[in-house]
Amino acid sequence: MAAHEESRCENCIIRQLNSLKALKKEELKAISDSKETRTIKKGEPLFKEGEKLNGVFCVRNGVSKLSKISDNGKDQIVKIASKGEVMGQRSVIAEEATNLSAVALNDMEVCFIPKTNITARIEDNPAFTQAILKYMAQELKLADDVIVNMAQKTVNQRLAEVLLYLDKTFGQDDEGYLALILSRSD
């Protein structure tokens, strides 16, 4: 991971896509002063399963897979995170090691926001806390839907649903192929 020229949170359009939109201008300035902008190359991990996170990652550009290693050693993708998503919130808020790994599927630019800055905003700003709760509730609903789909849909139905999701979320290239490239193992 490489660090580079800092961007300012209060001027960043990406924050409108996540819970950071609930922060006040002075809170955004405090986050900007403490965050670090990083470049992650394709295949590099942002964090690994079991790691204790000292902050969250806000995706500015690129795509990451969030996955879990099963008992038989298979890497199972749980979610794909793209522009605007914040990774690591649950682990930071719960003060526990992350139960997923995050690996860049293509070159990424992320902002790393220290835990102390996130927890201070949670304690001081009810609108921010509410935005995080809403996000986590949406994630729980999605997890419920995945569980039902796994139990009730055929492999072909699940594959079709994933392909439609990837097309809707990431679009197609000029030749009509999915813009996001995943390996067969992914």
Image: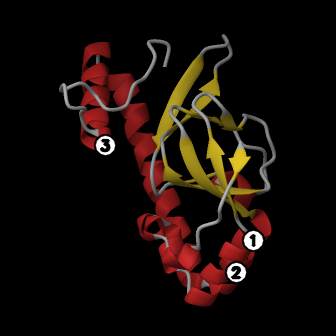
Residue kind at label 1, given as amino acid type: Ser
Residue denoted by label 3: 169
Task: Identify which residue is drawn at 59% across, 68% down.
Answer: 7
User: Alpha-carbon distance for marks 3 and 2?
Assistant: 32 Å
* Chain-order first, disc 1 or disc 3: 1
State whether residue 161 appears in this view: yes
At x 47% / y 38%, what residue is drawn? 80
Residue assigned mark 1: 34
Q: Nearer the viewer, residue 160 or 30?
A: 30
Q: Nearer the viewer, residue 93 or 118?
A: 118
Q: Amino acid at mark 2?
A: Ala
Q: Is residue 20 above or below residue 147?
A: below
Q: How many marks?
A: 3
> Residue beneath label 2, please?
30
The numbered mark, 3 or 2, whose residue comes first in the sequence reads 2
The answer to whether 184 is drawn above or below residue 118 in the figure is above
Disc 1 from disc 3: Cα separation: 31 Å
Mark in front: 1 vs 3? 1
Residue 123 place in picture, x, y as percent: 71, 80
Residue 41: x, y in percent?
61, 35
| Percent coordinates x, y for residue 83 in the rendering | 45, 52
SS label for mark 2: helix
In front: 130, or 60?
60
- Whether the residues at callouts 1 and 2 have beta carbons within 8 Å, the answer is yes
Depth check, front residue: 167 or 36 = 36
Secondary structure of the residue carrying numbered label 1:
helix
Q: Residue at x 54, y 79 (%)?
A: 10
Q: Residues within 10 Å of mark 1 (few under 14, many from 20)?
A: few
> Which residue is the extreme one toward the front?
5
Relative side of 121 to 169, left or right? right
Placement of 40 over or under 55, stated as above or below: above
Q: Position of residue 62 (x, y in %)?
A: 48, 43
